[in-house]
Amino acid sequence: MKPDATQEEGARFALARRRLLGAALATLAAPPVLAQGDWPGERVTIIVSLPAGATTDITTRLYADQLSRTWGHPVVVDNRGGANGVLAAQAVARARPDGRTLLATTAMTHAANPWLIPRLPYDPVGDFDAIAMWSASPFVMMATRGLGTPTLAALTAKLRAEPGRHNYATGTVPGRMVAELYRQLTGVDAVHVGYRGNQAAYPDLTQGRIAFMPVDIQAAKPIVDRGAVVALAVTDAERHYALPDVPSAVEAGLPDFRFLTWAGLYAPKGTPREVLLRIHADMVRAYQTPEVNARILANGGSRTPPTGPDTFQAHTISELAAWGRIIRESGMTLD
């Protein structure tokens, strides 16, 4: 899905393109990067766009520990959460492209922010080289038990029959996008109530003040496993191993209701390709170690190794367009 070309969108990225040109000229004047055999040669820093304890932070630290052993140099994790990841992304975008300063982030910085934040101080495509995407996870549509809607079709029918009478909650921007996609596909009319994080909404959801709520599968699994809510569907074409009893969107009768949030690793634009490939290959080996693999699967993470630079770069471009369509059609803002 490609966003419609407009003068406003062209202006939005014009500054980023000029900045990219300046960075390219600066790179030409910089001292040569160490050959791959010598890399990294010193400490590597991974800046995380989320606070400590977030799923992306936990996964980053798993990989960082293994990579430091492989490289024989420290891999430091630097959390710079807040501002929707802008501070972390901007820091890496401005870093020297030698592979020693990396960005661990989610779709928020590279697919959502460009459509939500005017004058974004980085270009999600032009300022970064993709390295590896380590997760792409669906959301779970959850309903309060007292609503009497055991299926997604039943929820849709009830909301259509009672327009404007029910509330729905979101605790994150991607969660809001899932809810907006559901509304776009079904035409239901419900009242949005925003919360500062998923956990803050759970009491109202379980006590019936909120009718439904989409939550990413890692965060949804504990409350679903407790039986505190009704899990109606996962937003993917197939069921997810972490919640095998929950129907897919296709099984639930809404095949276009597909939405994945993702996370991975980027480097500043201009990082030598051999360094990108080296990092990805070492991450794949780290994923295949029993320790890392077991912990990733325990958290509901990917059952396949991280994708490589070319695949992740193409995915970033495609998702930037797809998320833009949902945001524009919904009129979403960060307010």
Image: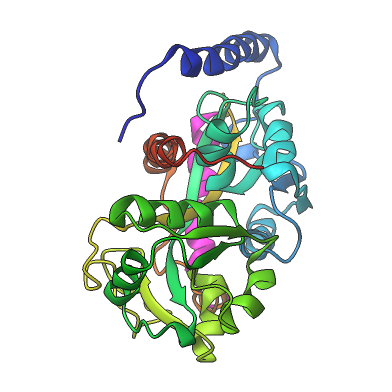
Residue 278, visible in the rendered structure: yes
Residue 289, visible in the rendered structure: no
Instruction: Please identify the quarter of the rendering in which residue 233 is found.
Output: bottom left
Q: Measuring from the top left, give residue 262's x and y in whole percent.
A: 48, 54
Q: Measuring from the top left, give residue 110's x and y in whole percent.
A: 54, 38
Q: Is residue 147 left or right of residue 174?
A: left
**Relative to 77, is 3 above or below?**
above
- Residue lying furthest bottom in this view? 226
Magenta: main secondary structure: helix
Is 51 in the magenta? no
Q: Is residue 245 left or right of residue 28?
A: left
Task: Specify the segment rendered in magenta.
Answer: 272-291
Q: Residue drawn at (66%, 20%), measured in percent from left and top?
A: 32
Query: Which quadrant is home to the N terminus?
Result: top left
Q: Residue drawn at (35%, 58%), measured in percent from left and top?
A: 188
Q: Measuring from the top left, give residue 97's x and y in whole percent.
A: 65, 27
**Relative to 132, is 94 above or below?**
above
Q: Residue drawn at (49%, 81%), measured in percent from left and top?
A: 144
Is 282 in the magenta? yes
Which sits in the foreground, 146 or 281? 146
**Relative to 331, is 94 above or below?**
above
Q: Residue drawn at (61%, 48%), measured in percent from left and top?
A: 105
Query: Which quadrant is home to the C terminus?
Result: top right
